[in-house]
Every structure is written in structure tokens, then in C-alpha cells.
Amino acid sequence: MLEKYLSKVNFNSYDDFVQNFKLNIPENFNFAYDVADEIADKTPEKVALVWCNDRGEEATFTFGQLKEYSNKAANFFKRVGIKKGDRVMLILKRRYEFWFAILALHKIGAACIPATHLLTAKDIIYRNNAADIKMIVCVGEDEVIKHVEESLEQSPTVMAKALIGRDKEGWYNFNKEIENESSHFERPTGKDATTNDDIMLLYFTSGTTGMPKMVAHDFTYPLGHIVTAKYWQNVIDGGLHLTVADTGWAKAAWGKIYGQWIAGSAVFVYDYDNKFVPKDLLDVICKYGVTTFCAPPTIYRFFIKEDLTKYDFSKLKYCTVAGEPLNPEVYNQFYKATGIKLMEGYGQTELTLTIGTFPWMEPKPGSMGKPSAGYVIDILDENGNPCEVGEEGQIVIRTDKSKPIGMFDGYYRDTELTKKVWHDDIYYTGDMAWRDEDGYFWFVGRADDVIKSSGYRIGPFEVESALLEHPAVLECAITAVPDPIRGQVVKATVVLAKNYSPCDELVKELQEHVKKVTAPYKYPRIIEFVDELPKTISGKIRRVEIRNKDQAKK
Ligand code: ATP
Ligand code: MG
């Protein structure tokens, strides 16, 4: 399958990879037919999806079965009036029906809007109207149903809604409906066929800094994730890959379908409804023999607090991490316990894997790695000039020669916002970093999170990493608090590890610790202990929330 889309598949060095990687983009590429169905036709018994939940239920789907189910679902969507270009929202958590539905929508050419189950009625109204959503398919849970139903009065475009595995008045029962449909679905032709410019997916960003933005991706997007899966996550043909992500986030597109299947790996899904329990996740990784694993740093931060020597990781070959900066301490402890080097990657909902530590590279703990093939990356200072080695600036992507395959087309129906971040052939990521003499990129913080105190610029990541080296600290967030004299002072909001409790001595000890391991001016003058950090649903620390709260106190 890879040979179909790449001029060269195997590379012997990072330089070979960035210089010779070339994607061949077919006309009217449609992932559902050209990848999923094609594998189904050639090898119907090949495993596509291995699924289990936290109640002991399990299921395995072959490509042959997925072709059948997605055809049935496509016939159902068509019957209720979904056509090419329509928009359908999926609130399906990690239920396996998500894969039937998304493939079906790709087949029809309708734009799919995966969303999280934690949306309130207000959030759903916003999305329904922002995207003129025509249909909603969701999990059969009371809370989700309630929010969707409450949104309807103010959502004039929604004309159908379906539930997974449940009968309810006014709703289709998705499972029953598709059961009765034909398992044959003809690929549309002529004006009904999808083109490479059509919108395939609309994703909301995580909302780490503010209101989530709606990111539009066209039908070539899955091909951009060949790099994500094959050359960064290093998935194995015939292997089993697990990316920890809810289907409502772009991270699911990074790790639960496109690149993995093109590269021949099955996708593993652990559908847990209750709170994340590190031990349970570790158990399923071992039990099902996950071969490659990808998760945000927060998952690894919890893993290293478990006794990892108790687990048999013999099947697990490769681990990647992205979504937030990875603190070197976490890298080191995970390596010590498992012998596996965490390979970091950087990207956004707007992009595919943009900077990464690739298999040919030796990871530098704390660094994201080097630019990905297809991305022309620079670091610019405040005046728009390229930074020198070691100098801090904003990560940008130059698109004057071409737009990387997989990069978004813009924020949906918001040209103003699109222009704000992407103009004169430069896309501004909003993230600050510097580059070392070997070309490795080091994350400093989001442009909005960088602290200016007494004339110094302080990146939160470095201070957080310093604090995490102290055994008392489980998680922490560094933010600025306004100060009449210094402009801003550094504050640490800290979640303590088991067996530690807040006290003045500990505050002193943590401050001294930071002064010792990093430049003393960066130490947190204020330390607050909390039980939990404010996070996005995808698990990212929302420093903005801490800042706003402190601001309100003033
Ligand atoms: P919003 O744009 O709504 O505030 P978000 O930026 O968190 O939310 P995503 O697209 O999910 O939404 O996340 C992309 C961001 O995550 C990047 O811009 C960067 O700030 C952060 N990020 C991703 N990978 C890394 C990494 N390896 N190191 C540091 N930061 C990372
Ligand atoms: Mg963002």
C-alpha cells in the first residue's frame, strides 16, 4: 500500500528521509475506497481494529467487515438524506461504531465533525450553527442525549439524529438501522464523487488557549499522516498500534485510522468511560500485545509513578509522545524502567507531524526533534527575521513553494482568523522554540504563556521540567502573576505526589530546588498546591485558566 503513495519507502538516515520523501497524490483520492476498501478487497481477513472496553467486552474487526459495516452505514446516511458536502457531527467517544460512521461519511463525501461527549447544549448550538450541521450521531448516554436535545430548538439545520445501541423516540437506532441496509455501496462518480479539494473533516482545536477553532481538512489529509504513522510512530506492518485519544480530537486522526492502516498496522482501541486509571491502561497494552504506542506526556507522567517492572512489555517496540512538551525527567524515568526511548513529536490540529524525533535520530530529552519531511520550518523573531542558533522565536511554516500535504485549508468560514495566523506565505504556529547547533528544536512555551519578569523572558516549560525533577511533584503549571514592581512574577501551581502534603517547608524546598537546577531568576516566587490542574478534555494543562483566576483575585 505504501508503494502506491510514495516514490521511496525505506530511508537510511534522517537526511535521506527529508530529501527524498515524496508523496504521489492520486486524483480524487478517497481514503475509504482507495485504502480501507482496497485492503478489504485484497486481504479481507486482515485485522483493522481491535477493540475492548473497561467492562471486559471485546471485539475485532477485519477490513472485510469494516467495508461491509461502512457500506451499510453509508446506505443509512444516504436514506436519511445525507449528501456530498453535508456536515455530520459524531459524538462517539471510543465506540467502534465511530469507524463505521466516519468511513461511511467519507464514502458519501459528507464532511465529518468528530466532537467530544463533554460538550454542553451551548457548545453544541455553537457548532451546529457554525457548520450548519445536518445530522448528529452520538453515544446513547442520558447526559449526551440531554445536551443534544436541548440544542435542537436553536439548531435549525439539524434534520436527523441517531443513537448508538439504543431506542429512543425522535432518534434513529444506528445499529438497528444499519443492520437492515445493504452491504453494497456504489462509489459515486461524476459530480457526486469527492475531489482532493473537498472538505473531509472539520476538527475543533483543543481549546488550550481560548475558544476552540474549527479546522478544515481536505481529502488529501490522510496521506499527510503517512509520515505521522510510518516514520514517526514507527508502526509495524501487521502490528497493533495504540494512540491514546478520544475520537473527538484530531489526535485520533493522527493515531487511530489513516496513517496506521496505510502502513499496514491494526489499530487498538481501549474504550474506557470512567476516569483514566494508569494501571488499567498498562494492563491492556500488555494483554493485547500493543506493538507501538503514542500518548500525551500526561499519560507517561502517571505511568512512571507506577511500578513498571511488574509489566511484560516484550511486545511493545516503540513509544511516541506529543501534544505537550515532554519533561526530560519523564523521559529518563520511563527509559530507566522500560528501556524504551520516548520519541517526541510536535504538531497541531491544523497540521500533521511537523517536527519529530525520527527512528534514525538519537533523541535529546526535552527536544521535539527536527523538521518533518514536507515542512519548511523556520524560527522568527518579533521583527520577522530568522533566529540564530540558540535564539528564541516563533515556529513558522513557509508555504511559498507549496503547502505541506495534510496541512489545513484554513479555519472554517473564518477567513479573518485564517489570515491572522497565515499570511504572506507564512503560517504562524503561536509556539515559541529555539534550535540547537544540530538542528534540534527545543520548545519554550506557547507565545501567550511566555512570562516577562524584570526584563527576563521565562518559558514555562523549563521551570516545569525543573520542578518535576523533585520527587514531591506529580504535575505542575508555571504561569505569570501580575506584579507592580517586576511586571510579572513566576507562579507554580503544583499537584503533589502520593505521600506528600503541602507545607511551608516544602514551598521553600521546591524554590531552592528550582534555583539549583536552573537559572535562579526563574524560580517560582509563589507556589500554590492544588489537587488537580485545569486541563482540556484532551488532557492539556490550561495555564490560561490559572492566569485568569489569579487576575480575578487582584
Ligand atoms: P487551541 O489552539 O484551541 O488553544 P491547542 O493548540 O492545544 O488548542 P491542538 O491543536 O490540540 O490544540 O494542540 C496543538 C498545540 O499543542 C501546539 O500548538 C503546541 O502548543 C502543543 N504541542 C503539541 N506537541 C507538542 C510538543 N511536542 N511539545 C510542546 N508542545 C506541543
Ligand atoms: Mg492551537
Image (spheres, helix red, strand yellow):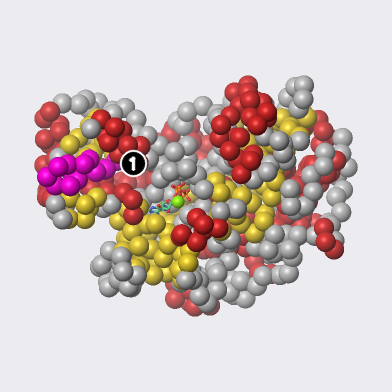
The x and y percentages for residue 511 are 14, 40
**Along the horizontal axis of the image, is 274 left or right of 469?**
right
Q: Quadrant of the N terminus?
A: bottom right
| Main secondary structure along the magenta-highlighted residues | strand
Give the answer, above or below, for where 412 lies relative to 275: below
Front position in the image: 190 or 45: 190
Residue at the image position 82 percent from the left and 38 percent from the top: 80
- Badge 1 crowding class, 10 Å Cα cut-off, few under 14, some 14 to 19, many 20 or more, is many
**Along the horizontal axis of the image, is 130 left or right of 358?**
right
Q: Quadrant of residue 5?
A: bottom right
Question: Which residue type does callout 1 highlight?
Answer: Arg
* Count of labels in the image: 1
**Along the horizontal axis of the image, is 438 left or right of 122?**
left
Whether disc 1's CB lies below 8 Å from ligand 1 is answered no
Give the answer, above or below, for where 299 lies relative to 325: above
Residue at the image position 30 percent from the left and 65 percent from the top: 382
Q: Which residue is mark 1?
A: 543
Q: Quadrant of the C terminus?
A: top left
Residue at the image position 58 percent from the left and 29 percent from the top: 121
Confirm whether residue 243 shows in the render.
no
The x and y percentages for residue 182 are 88, 42
**Secondary element at tag 1:** helix
Front position in the image: 275 or 171: 171
Residue at the image position 35 percent from the left and 41 percent from the top: 544
**Along the horizontal axis of the image, is 44 left or right of 526?**
right
Confirm whether residue 157 shows in the render.
yes
Front position in the image: 158 or 109: 158
User: Magenta stretch: residue 486 in it?
Assistant: yes
User: Magenta stretch: residue 316 in it?
Assistant: no
Q: Give the magenta part as a residue range.
A: 477-490
The x and y percentages for residue 344 are 41, 56
Front position in the image: 315 or 145: 145
